[in-house]
Amino acid sequence: MAMKVTCFADEISQDLEEQLQVLSEMGLSHLEIRSVWGKNVLELDAEELDRINGMVKERGFGVSSIASPVGKYATCILRMPRRNCVCSCLLEKATGASANY
């Protein structure tokens, strides 16, 4: 099984275009989305996710993972009566940001 080298692209910049440019220069083809444009992945709306998807595909990149902060809130989420809504939200964000492996 081949592994893909990837990184938290927001450690490069909050600007997605700059993230993709630097990763391209480094020879990487995948990124982990944690935050873009100063927003955590969970705060991105549908329009922003579409924009990310378009930029990533246009540059030939793949999204290796969605780095959500869900682990920080896991015990809280598990106690929530509507915890499935949180899980659904994460899945929606991952799908919207083209999480292809």
Image (spheres, rainbow, N blue to C red):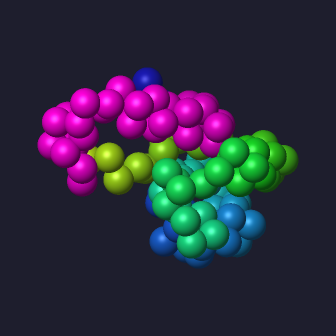
Q: Which residue is at the front of the view, 54 or 22?
A: 54
Q: How far across and how far down the image is residue 23, in percent?
A: 63, 62
| Point 56% across, 40% down: residue | 93
Q: Quadrant of the N terminus?
A: top left
Q: Tell whether position 90 is magenta.
A: yes
Residue at 60% across / 64% down in the picture? 36
> Looking at the image, can residue 3 be seen?
no
Q: Which residues are magenta?
A: 72-101
Q: Quadrant of the C terminus?
A: top right
Q: Position of residue 95 (x, y in %)?
A: 60, 32
Total numbered labels placed on residues in the image: 0
What's the residue at 53%, 56% (across, down)?
43
**Looking at the image, can residue 43 be seen?**
yes
Relative image position of residue 96 (x, y in whole percent) = 65, 37
Residue 21, image x, y percentages = 72, 67
- Which quarter of the picture shows residue 37? bottom right
| Residue 25 is covered by the magenta coloring | no
